[in-house]
Amino acid sequence: MKTFAERFETLARERSPLCLGLDPSRDLLMEWGLGDDAESLRRFCGAVLDAAGDRVAVVKPQAAFFERLGPAGMAELASVTAAVRERGTLSLIDAKRGDFTETMKGYAQAMLGADSGFGGDAMTVTAYLGFDALRPVFERAVTTKTAVFVVVRSSNPEGRALQDARLPDGRAVADALADDITAFNAAVGSGFGPLCAVMGATIDTAQAATLARMPRSLFLAPGVGAQGATCEDVAGAFGPAIGRTMPSVSRAILRQGPSSAALREAVDRWRDAAWRAAEGVVVEA
């Protein structure tokens, strides 16, 4: 079985590196004229996935919008990851889990791998309880050839104070996380490792310097579309790393529904923009 990075490499070339965020919030369901229940969730996700077809490399369901509906919503999350897999697309469960080591074992078993509770190809995590507390998730990613995206620099301005805070050795928290990610990847093999990073599409030039500390990682760049960034902005900020970056677009596409034609047109427009941004840059795992 190929690793997440190897599968992404192929899909990025065939479909573009676009990541489609699947965020079935109550507001969006209402905009579509749907109810706020599991059946409406199913109809929403089905319509989006049908419109996306085989046009995107990654689909990123936001777990919170499924969990808010309780067990029925969580069952729909599992159904979505299965449907994504059937389309040959990678699923990245955006759950941003972060807890003590023993608890993280449970999250790893829940989220990562075809035999897990939700069957994800990747998940997001946060390291506020310490990088080493996340090791059960990292280790499962190695054995299942999945991936873990650690939040390093987020797209929300509220995160900057913590991410730029200085450790006693002078490094910013974000840079220290980047160094830890690179050390782990180097220890498990050559090429791109299972540890990836969330780096907001809205980062500035100074923040973008953190990218260079992670030469063995893929990047998820949220904040494209509704938060104001474009794929061209990502290319400008990420520089040489754009070839291993997945720009993530959610509301800018989802708000085009429920029209299937409008959804497909939006997916194609953003897919082409992501392709242009990465044009001429080859990703090799």
Image (cartoon, helix red, strand yellow):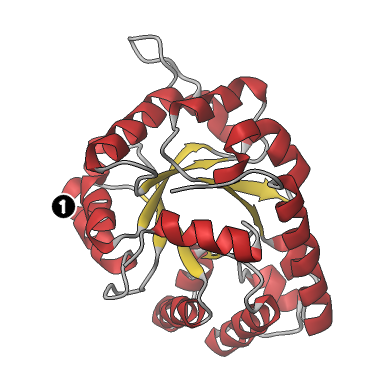
Residue at the image point whose x is 76% and y is 50% from the top: 276
Tell me residue 147's x, y (percent).
Answer: 37, 55
In the displayed structure image, the side of residue 218 where residue 36 appears, left or right: right
In the displayed structure image, the side of residue 52 where residue 264 appears, left or right: right
Tell me residue 46's x, y (percent).
Answer: 61, 85
Q: Is residue 103 above or below residue 56?
A: above
When asked about the image quadrant of residue 204, the answer is top right
Disc 1 crowd rating (10 Å Cα; few below 14, some 14-19, many 20+) is: few
Residue at the image point whose x is 27% and y is 60% from the top: 108
Residue at the image point whose x is 64% and y is 71% from the top: 26
When asked about the image quadrant of residue 25, the answer is bottom right
In-front residue for pair 165/177: 177
Q: Which residue is mark 1?
A: 102
Residue at the image point whose x is 52% and y is 61% from the top: 10
Q: Looking at the figure, which quarter contains the N terminus?
A: bottom left
Tell me residue 141's x, y (percent).
Answer: 29, 56
How many labels sit on residues? 1
In-front residue for pair 129/60: 60
Q: Is residue 211 above or below residue 170?
A: below
Tell me residue 47's x, y (percent).
Answer: 67, 84
Query: Is residue 228 visible from the viewing direction of this image?
Result: no
Q: Amino acid at mark 1?
A: Glu
Q: Is residue 145 above or below residue 194?
A: below
In-front residue for pair 284/204: 284
Query: Is residue 77 visible from the viewing direction of this image?
Result: yes
In-front residue for pair 23/148: 148
In the displayed structure image, the side of residue 39 where residue 254 appears, left or right: right
Q: Secondary structure at mark 1?
A: helix
